[in-house]
C-alpha cells in the first residue's frame, strides 16, 4: 500500500510539473502524443501486484524504476507534435521576431459551413493585448502587430468540429500600458464557439454579444479582461481563473445568471445579483429565464465585476 502511494505521488508530480512548465511556456507538451502508451501503466500495476504479494523490496524497486523510466520517455515523447492526419491546414508559417521594431502579420482561415458547426478557438501566449474587432466572412482573421515573439495559427478538423490554435511563444517585452504585441481578431458569426484562453500577463477586450458562444474559459495571471456576452444560445458557461487581475464581465439583462465564486482576497461587484450561501449569486430572473449564463470565478487577489446591460 505504501508503494502504491509513492507511485501515485510520482505520477501526480509528473503531471503537475508538465502543466506548470506549459503554463510558463518553457515547453509545449502534446498529450495526444503520449496517450496511446497508457497500457504500459497496466504492466506496471501488474508487476507491482505480483511483487507486493511476496512483499519483495526488490520488486518494489523494479516497479519504481520502470515507472520513472516510462515517465522520462513520455516527457520527451510528449514534446513532439502528434502525427495526426486530421491537421489539415497550417495557415501561416511561424514568424520569429526579436527586435524593437513592429512587424504587421496577418493570419486567416476560410469558412466552410459543412464542417464549422462547432468551432473551438484556443488562444495561448503572454505579453499581448487581444481584441475582438468584428465579424468576417472567413472563419477567423487575426492581425498581429508583433514586437517580439513567435505567432502561429493552426487548424484541425474532425467531423463537424473545427479546432483553431493561435499561439504566441518566445520573448515578450509587453508591460501594462507600455505597448507590446497587439492582436485583433475577426470571427465568423455562424458557428457555435468555444473559446479557451491561456495566458500570463496581457489584456483581453472581447465583444462577444454578436456570437453564439457556448463556452468561454480563461486561465491567466496578471491580466485585464473586459468581456461582453450575448444571448444567442440557451446556455453559456463562463469560467475565469486568475492570479492578480481586473475582470469585467457584461451580460444581457434578459438572461438569468448564476455566479459561483472562489475568490480568496479578491473584491467583488455584482450589481443586481442576490447573494445566496457558499459564495453563490443569482439574478432575480434566474429561474424564470429561458436563457442562462453560468459564471465560475476563481482568483487570488483580483477585482471581479459582473454588470448587466
Image (cartoon, helix red, strand yellow):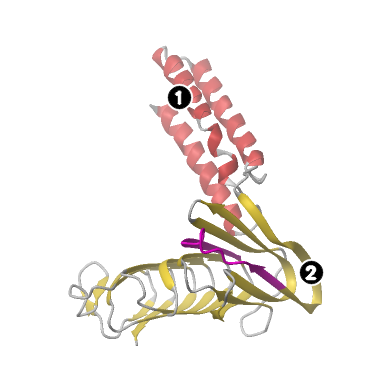
Quarter that holds the C terminus: bottom left
Element at label 1: helix
Foreground of the two, 270 or 231: 231
Instruction: Give the vertical position of 269 relative to 114 (above or below).
Output: below
Q: Position of residue 155 (x, y in %)?
A: 61, 58
Element at label 2: strand
Residue, x 73% and y 67% (percent of image)? 149
44 left or right, relative to 304:
right
Picture quarter containing residue 170?
bottom right
The residue sitting at the bottom extreme is: 309
Instruction: Give the vertical position of 44 relative to 12 (above or below).
Output: above
206 left or right, relative to 81:
left
127 left or right, relative to 236:
right
Q: Residues within 10 Å of mark 2 (few under 14, many from 20)?
A: some
Picture quarter containing residue 240?
bottom left
Residue, x 35% and y 84% (percent of image)? 307
Numbered badge on residue 251: none
The answer to whether any part of residue 45 appears in the image is yes
Picture quarter containing residue 252?
bottom left
Foreground of the two, 73 or 130: 130
Is 280 in the magenta?
Answer: no
The residue sitting at the top extreme is: 54
- Mark 1 lies on residue: 45
Magenta segment boundaries in residue numbering: 106-124
Q: Position of residue 103 (x, y in %)?
A: 77, 77
Amino acid at each position: 500500500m505504501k508503494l502504491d502511494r509513492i507511485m501515485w505521488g510520482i505520477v501526480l508530480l509528473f503531471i503537475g510539473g508538465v502543466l506548470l512548465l506549459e503554463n510558463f511556456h518553457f515547453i509545449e507538451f502534446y498529450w495526444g502524443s503520449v496517450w496511446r502508451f497508457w497500457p504500459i501503466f497496466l504492466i506496471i500495476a501488474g508487476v507491482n501486484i505480483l511483487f507486493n504479494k511476496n512483499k519483495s523490496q526488490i520488486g518494489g524497486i523494479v516497479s519504481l524504476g520502470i515507472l520513472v523510466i516510462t515517465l522520462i520517455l513520455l516527457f520527451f515523447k510528449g514534446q513532439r507534435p502528434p502525427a495526426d492526419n486530421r491537421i489539415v491546414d497550417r495557415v501561416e508559417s511561424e514568424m520569429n521576431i526579436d527586435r524593437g521594431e513592429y512587424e504587421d502579420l496577418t493570419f486567416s482561415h476560410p469558412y466552410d459551413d459543412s464542417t464549422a458547426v462547432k468551432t473551438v478557438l484556443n488562444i495561448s501566449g503572454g505579453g499581448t493585448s487581444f481584441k475582438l474587432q468584428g465579424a468576417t466572412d472567413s472563419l477567423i482573421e487575426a492581425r498581429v502587430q508583433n514586437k517580439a515573439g513567435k505567432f502561429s495559427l493552426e487548424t484541425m478538423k474532425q467531423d463537424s468540429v473545427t479546432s483553431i490554435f493561435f499561439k504566441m511563444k518566445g520573448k515578450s517585452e509587453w508591460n501594462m500600458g507600455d505597448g507590446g504585441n497587439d492582436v485583433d481578431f475577426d470571427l465568423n458569426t455562424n458557428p457555435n464557439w468555444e473559446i479557451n484562453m491561456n495566458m500570463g500577463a496581457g489584456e483581453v477586450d472581447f465583444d462577444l454579444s454578436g456570437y453564439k458562444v457556448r463556452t468561454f474559459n480563461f486561465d491567466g495571471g496578471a491580466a485585464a479582461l473586459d468581456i461582453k456576452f450575448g444571448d444567442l444560445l440557451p446556455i453559456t458557461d463562463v469560467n475565469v481563473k486568475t492570479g492578480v487581475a481586473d475582470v469585467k464581465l457584461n451580460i444581457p439583462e434578459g438572461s438569468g445568471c448564476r455566479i459561483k465564486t472562489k475568490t480568496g482576497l479578491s473584491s467583488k461587484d455584482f450589481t443586481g445579483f442576490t447573494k445566496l450561501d457558499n459564495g453563490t449569486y443569482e439574478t432575480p430572473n434566474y429561474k424564470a429565464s429561458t436563457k442562462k449564463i453560468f459564471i465560475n470565478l476563481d482568483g487570488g487577489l483580483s477585482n471581479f465585476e459582473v454588470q448587466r446591460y
